[in-house]
Image (tube, helix red, strand yellow):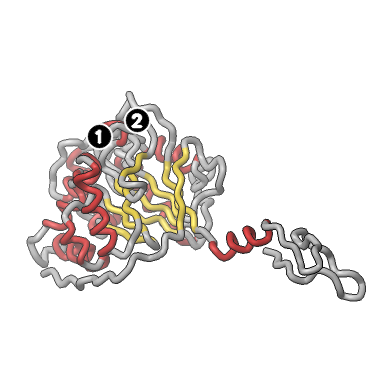
Amino acid sequence: MLNLTLIVAFSLVANTYSYTSVANGPSVHETGDLVAIGDVHGSLDNLLITLYKNGIVDENGHWVAGNRTVVQTGDLIGRGHQDKQVIEYIIKIQKEAEKFGGRWVQLMGNHEWMEIHNIYDYANDGPGIGFGSLQLRHKELHSGEIGDWLYNLPVIYKWEDTIFVHGGLSKTWISKYNVDDINQHVWDYLDGLHSDNTLANDLLWDRDLATKQEEEVCSILEESLYNFNSTRMVLGHTITNTIGFEAGKIGDRCDGKLILIDVGLSSYFKSIPKKWSALHIYRRNFEHEAMIEAMSERRIDKFGRDRTKPEPRDNNGTGRKDILYP
């Protein structure tokens, strides 16, 4: 049964990151230290385009993101026609990322959760589609490499000061527990060690943070973030244009503390324009920024000389020596 360790968070970590979402690959910054991708829904072709345009893979689908981390927030399958191809590709790219010092973090979505529980309402199978047949789908999702992989997906992930879940987290009691223990509780359920699936159902299906009025949910979000010692939460599950954001683009609420990244990437959603949006989170080096700022300020010495611009040392080793070079 559940043996969760309570978290007592005395203060939030410093907000040392900035984020931006992009429509056609990073146009200002290079690829983020972390890149997050929303729901895929059986659309390998569109996933590959998104990864390519966001600097994660090359034109052949191979990892080029070095030691960066990619988080995909679940719902790889369901609705589309390439479910098996998507899963096989993710298993492959996870291994490639690890080989080059990077990491692909794959979360469980509610569609994976449904099919683990033999609910195939959104499955598409047939000649050249999905797993070929419902019988083959059932077999592969519950055994072998794909089954083992699927049953071990986490439902929540924390990177630095950011929490990732598929659906949402509007019940603050969940945030009082350790992320690792929440995942272990779900894995123990899938292993048949207990029958409590409350945590998974809440995290995978909840839409309240995304859909309810901000005055109702931002305080709830703040409490959960405080408990997790985090500054933002990233969700998939709810397509952004269904809640008022521009179609195909990432949305945010609660002063940017809640980021919504399900942009309707799948080819199943034909009416949603494909802008290949992904969330990029960049580390900020405050020491470097402070140094650059200090170097840009005009400084006058006690003799009235402008010492803002660096002066090279002469052959005797004298000259400007109070400039720090990055």
Q: Is residue 212 above or below residue 99?
A: above
| Three-letter amino acid code of the residue under disc 2 | Ser
Mark 1, secondary structure of its residue: loop
Q: Residue at x 46, y 52 (%)?
A: 18
**Residues packed near mark 2 inside 10 Å, few (<14), some (14 to 19) or many (20 plus):** many
Q: Nearer the viewer, residue 136 or 33?
A: 33
Residue 140 showing in the rendered view: no
Q: Residue at x 22, y 55 (%)?
A: 143
Q: Nearer the viewer, residue 46 or 204?
A: 204
Specify the quadrant that holds the N terminus: bottom left
Q: Position of residue 301 (x, y in %)?
A: 76, 67
Q: Position of residue 108 (x, y in %)?
A: 26, 52
Q: Going from the N terminus, do you reach mark 2 or mark 1 first? A: 1
Q: Residue at x 39, y 63 (%)?
A: 160
In this rendering, position of residue 302 left or right of residue 27: right
| Three-letter amino acid code of the residue under disc 1 | Arg
Query: Which residue is the extreme one toward the left?
Result: 195
Number of numbered markers: 2
According to the image, label 2 marks what residue? 267
Q: Position of residue 3 (x, y in %)?
A: 15, 72
Q: Give residue 14's mark.
A: none
Mark 2, secondary structure of its residue: loop
Q: Is residue 277 above or below residue 312?
A: above
Q: What separation in Å lies between label 2 and label 1 (alpha carbons)?
A: 9 Å
**Residues packed near mark 1 inside 10 Å, few (<14), some (14 to 19) or many (20 plus):** many
Residue 283 showing in the rendered view: yes
Q: Is residue 124 above or below residue 237?
A: above
Query: Which residue is the extreme one toward the right?
Result: 315
Q: Is residue 93 above or below residue 319?
A: above
Q: Nearer the viewer, residue 34 or 196?
A: 34
According to the image, label 1 marks what residue? 79
Specify the quadrant that holds the C terminus: bottom right
